[in-house]
Image (tube, rainbow, N blue to C red):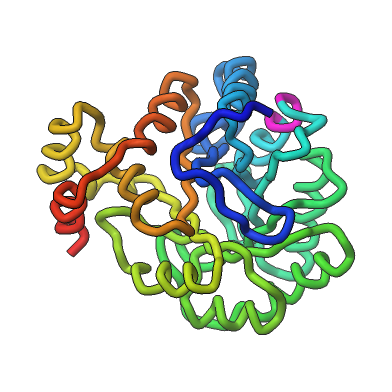
Amino acid sequence: MATTTLPGGTFTMAPGMTVTRVGYGAMQLAGPGVLGPPADPDAAVALLREAVALGINHIDTSDFYGPVVTNQIIKEALHPYPEELRIVTKVGALRDETGAWLNGRTPEKLRQAVHDNLAHLGLDALDVVNLRMGGLSGAEPGSIAEQFTVLAELQQQGLIRHLGVSTVSAEQIAEAQSIAPVVCVQNFYNIANRQDDDLIDDLAGQGIAYVPYFPLGGFTPLQSDTLATVAERLGTRPFAVALAWLLQRSPNILLIPGTSSVAHLHENVVGAGLTLSEADLAELNSIGV
């Protein structure tokens, strides 16, 4: 892999598990609606190879993207994988023939999902598996012990190296930690949706990565005059400012912006590297209050 210096540097999730803070979210490699193959499979392969060439060693994916399609493209593009590459996947959801998102959290479905990810990625063990709970953009009440225990058992069998959780509350994270170590939390969060501020700080103190994701339409609130004003002043796009703000928000935040365009991939990397002044940050922080 390249040794390009990426914005934000790296973060060590666990011993032997150091990732670039600017990663790549592979969701958009699939077709429209995250369903079926992309219009240009060769371009998707080229995009992944360019991400690795830029120095990105953190790819976020799931077998329910496509479904299966995204993982197959990753395998085609990058297998045999560079030694430094870390692939993070998630389980807990399924797709039906219409593309609907379904619950896939029974023990049997979780075990099958892990084996499917292994097979379609061409791996003997998965670097990180996130247990996807909750709704589209927020945690739902209830225990996650049964589901997390299934993944912990698969970890003990050597099929998973590290475990994470997604769309969960602080209480659910603590419950998971009572079963097995948690190396990352993937929740809905951005400059305009700051409900996890306290959680991010708590996880930073524990050395646990926080990976914000943005569901469909999640950036709609970011079409604000304040964000546009700062972006115009800096000569860039609002999305780039939002990425840079996340990197500066806390050292444990990892970015996984997705795109199907090499040009946008480069823009995301450059944008994340913007240096926001204290005045910029003060102005931007007013958005989420």
Locate residue 222, reporting x and y percent: 23, 46
Placement of 168 over or under 239, stated as above or below: below
Which residue corresponds to the image point at 21% horizontal and 60% vertical from the top-left? 288
Placement of 165 over or under 73, stated as above or below: below
Q: Is residue 76 in the magenta section?
A: yes
Displayed quadrant of residue 153: bottom right
Which residue corresponds to the image point at 41% horizontal and 60% vertical from the top-left? 137
Judge left or right: residue 124 versus residue 215: right
Judge left or right: residue 64 versus residue 247: right
Locate residue 156, reporting x and y percent: 85, 69
Q: Is residue 156 visible?
A: yes
Which residue corresponds to the image point at 39% horizontal and 45% vertical from the top-left? 216
- Quadrant containing the C terminus in the rendered view: bottom left
* Majority SS type along the magenta span: helix
Locate residue 108, reporting x and y percent: 79, 66
Judging depth in this view, the residue of 93 and 17 nearest the camera is 17
Locate residue 144, reporting x and y percent: 61, 77
Which residue corresponds to the image point at 34% horizontal and 56% vertical from the top-left? 249
Displayed quadrant of residue 244: top left
Placement of 27 over or under 208, stated as above or below: above
- Quadrant containing the N terminus in the rendered view: top right
Judging depth in this view, the residue of 79 and 115 nearest the camera is 79
| Image: magenta residue range | 73-77
Q: Is residue 103 in the magenta section?
A: no
